[in-house]
Amino acid sequence: MLISDFDGVIVDGMEEYWWSARRAAAQLLPAGVPLPQAVPEAFRQLRPQVHHGWEMPLLAAVIAGHGQPLAAFHMDYAAALAASLQQLAWSELQLTEALDAVRQQAIASDRQAWLALHRPYPWMLKALQRFDAAGVPWGVLTTKSAGFTAELLSSHQLHPQVIYGREDGPKPEVLQRLLAQAPAHGPWRFLEDRRLTLEAVRALPALDAVHCLLVTWGYLRPGDDQDLPSGIKLLEPEVLDQPLAQWPAAAIVQAN
């Protein structure tokens, strides 16, 4: 069974990320703080570091001159993130709720305009539509809300067997539950554009049977596709034209 990340693997949502993050930040910052309409280059550069959606409104505030300086994020992203939260007296929950509210309002007021901010990667769209037509099971595992993810997939007539969102817990834990509940659905392939997530999966012996594939598109950090550890392989767009069984094998084989 194929399990895929969503943002940066199935869709390019950069325009939507900034559109929503900008509006969520504007609700929390003092009135009149200027935020550019177009996606700033600083936001594009830092997006590959983002792990959870709530980080994006915080980055929008930082770009507007609030929180830690941008240079601090390039030096130590996690430390600058934590320091900015404390400096602004914001919480992860507060930012998550602000971001969700912006998206819910956008869907309610102009669903088509919001959907149009997301651009599916054509090679993934083609492959997943082929899987649907052939009855090949696949699912989505994302840190985005499962509801928003389902809305976007439905707009492209994509029908995953399962969708796991941020509500379901960390990705390695969800994968462990999946394998325990449905071992017969293997071999398992997990697609990600975040190397750190794949390394976390690879660190768990219970997930040795999962083929961890790092896509070469999406929001990779510089150097993420270099010197991959054992058990993680690159997935190029042209490979998606092949049957799933011919995709790279990256499971850990235990010696007898």
Image (spheres, rainbow, N blue to C red):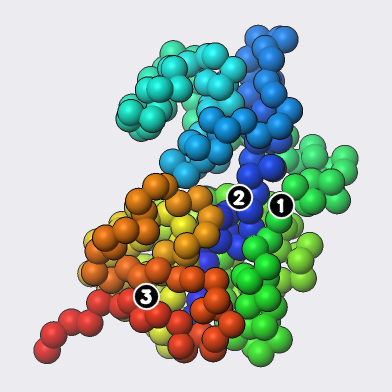
Left or right position of 214 against 128:
left
The image quarter containing residue 70 is: top left
Q: Is residue 228 left or right of residue 180?
A: left
Give percent across and percent down for residue 238: 55, 76
Residue 229 can be seen, yes or no: yes
The local secondary structure at tag 2 comes to loop
Give 68 or 108, whichever is nearer the viewer: 68
Q: Residue at x 66, y 34 (%)?
A: 39
User: What amino acid is at disc 2?
Assistant: Ser
Q: Residues within 10 Å of mark 3 (few under 14, many from 20)?
A: many
**For residue 252, side relative to residue 3 (left or right):** left
| Image coordinates for residue 41, horizontal then vertical, percent | 58, 33
Question: In the drawing, what numbered circle is on residue 118?
Answer: 1
Q: Position of residue 250 (x, y in %)?
A: 33, 76
Tag 1 secondary structure = loop
Q: Read off the residue under disc 3.
A: 211
Q: Is residue 7 above or below residue 139?
A: above
- Which kind of residue does numbered mark 1 sit on? His
Residue at screen point 47% across, 89% down: 245
State which mark lies toward you, 3 or 2.
3
